[in-house]
Amino acid sequence: MSVSRRTPRVPEHDDRPESTGRGLGRRSLLVAGSIPVAAALTMGTANAAGSPGALNTQKRLVATPVDGSTLAELRALTSGVTAGSVYFVTDPGKEGHFRYDAADSTSVDNEGTVVVSTAGLRFKRIYQGPVSVKWFGAKGDGVTDDTVAIQKAINAAQLEAAVLRFPTSRPYLISATLVIDSSKGGLRIIGDTRRSVGSGRYSTIKVADTVSTSAPLNHVFKFTDSQENTRYEFSDLCIDGSLRARYGIYSVTINHSLFQRIWINQTLTAALAIGYGWCNDVVECELSLNKGDGIVFVGESVNALNVVNSKIYYNDGIGINMSLPTLSARIQGCTIEQNKKCGVYVQQGATALSILNCYIEANALDGMTMSGRLVKAHVVINGNSDAANPLTIANTVPCSDVVIAGNIVASFYEDTFIEAYAVDRALTVQDNAINRYDFSRTTSTNPYVVLRLGTNLTGSGSRVNGCNLKDNHVAMIGTVVPSAQLSVLNLAGAHTDYHGLSISDVHRINYAPALSTFGVVQAATTPGTFTAVSTRYRMHDSMKLTGSTQTSRWGVSLNAADYPELAGKYVYFGVSVKQSAAGMGTILLGGSSGTDAQPASSSTEWREVSQVVLFPATGTVLFGIGVSSDSAAKSLLVSRPVIAELGAPYLTLQ
């Protein structure tokens, strides 16, 4: 069968690249009748070699005519085709040049870049730059189901190591998950814009209304995760779950990938689910209007994740749900706003996490119930590895080296900027400017707190070490309520490590008298003895507690009226101790907080222990130390007593 010759039509909106060879525009190739193409035309690659979007190796055209034909006419060809012949296809949205490859007898017709005739002739599209989903039959008209066409385009782009493009259009509707084969290597999926460009036209993949809300899609884009996904990109797209998809993009293992200028909305569980991997970037994205979370961690630990200059807001769940351990995650320059449960929830094991220079507003309209307590905070730091009970407060997998600094915070529903329950090293909260508004709760008189900490009684072993609060400023807009840099939960009978906490503008004063003045402030049946010894610790005198398995508490009594500057403030009683053998524990007494029986230790080195009390305005406050031991013959050396406002680090005081 022969193909009629005609002058090829140049479409008004062409998805083909402007250039197809050395300096020759596409229109230079669209010649009428049998006028030949230039004798030798080199086809270059679209991107740098080795990149995910690189085109296959250079192709050379032979001197053959360019024929105008339809795909149907190409598929009807049975004979009379010369090797290397080039045909121009005129089907709307699929326009382009196809070359007959006489050496190929196996390629499958994918309707976009490979066309196979009824006689088995293979025609290959000649192209530079991205592969268009429209070549494969996607309409993008907001009516047609484009699922099959888009899936074919994804498969072809991966096979040819090309970039896949969604041209500006009305929504591309899908009714099934779009699957990315992890075994085929990296892929760039791009659009022209995530926002409307006149008449509602933009690059949107939308779940069709034909999908039932009672049986939603699990994902819009899903990786097979048969191996680590490396060097993928999603850019300049809108993904609309239509409240008929649980996730927008989902991968449990991904590396060196980029999510850039994408808008994911109307998903049920989370817009973006990222799993184990390294060096992934979420840049200038908008994750909003989702029924669940903006970002959630899935799979295993997520490392070196950068969320930069992105807008994560108006989600019914958590803005960024860091449900798995993470190493070196950075959230910077983002807007984290109006997420109903929490802005950022760190469930467990974040090391070297930074939240910097963000705008954070109104993130706890609903809050989260954690271990029976309603928590309304912008940022929550936990240490819980229990996936079945993610909101239980615990210290199983604590965080470390966390920095939250330089943020502008607007609090409407929150009582706290940050709640932290599990940090075993270095939590820095610095240079945050916080406004507390009363627009949504004009009758509330709850104090506003910059940082609320837990004790071992707040959750399973909950505790925080090494806090540093510096230059955080709180302004009250509307009804003025009390504000504080710090609050501590569950003090009665609890122990903490807050003697190392540092707060700017806290007076560095030690109110403790000398050890030699200590007496019995709480008696025991067998009191034991508290005597001076020659041993000194860092130039300080020491005393020895011994003679009982449960000694009396030896210490000091302070009249609160003599210390009005401490009224209503958190104060700690700390001492340095050295036990003679394993199997011993300290018992601390701190005013209304009662006794704190700290766990037995096996260490015989000097260490610091402390107890925290909320200092009253009136009455007597007792501070003391005793010993709990498995043998009355064992002893405890005590040195360097400190009674100071919380935020005056123990080791800085004389």
Image (tube, helix red, strand yellow):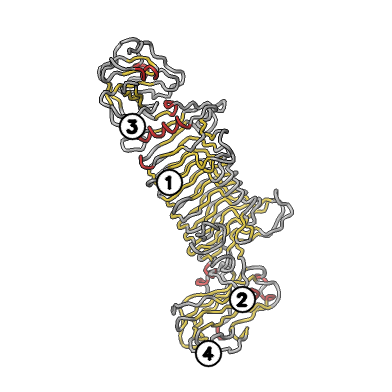
Residue at the right extreme, as displayed: 443
**For residue 39, above or below residue 332:** above
User: How far apart are the two marked residues, 4 and 3, measured between alpha carbons?
Assistant: 83 Å
The numbered mark at residue 547 is 4
Distance between the alpha carbons at the discs numbered 1 and 2:
48 Å
Q: Are marks 1 and 4 in contact (CB under 8 Å)?
A: no
Outermost residue toward the front in this view: 119
Question: Mark 3: which amino acid?
Answer: Leu
Q: Tag 2, which secondary structure?
A: strand
- Which residue is labeled 1 in the image? 280
* Precedes in sequence: disc 2 or disc 4: 4
Q: Position of residue 115 (x, y in %)?
A: 36, 24
Regarding residue 569, the answer to whether it shows in the image is yes
Mark 1 or 3: the one toward you = 3
**What label sits on residue 479 in the rendered view?**
none
Q: Which amino acid type is marked by label 4?
A: Gly
Q: CA distance from mark 1 to mark 4?
A: 60 Å
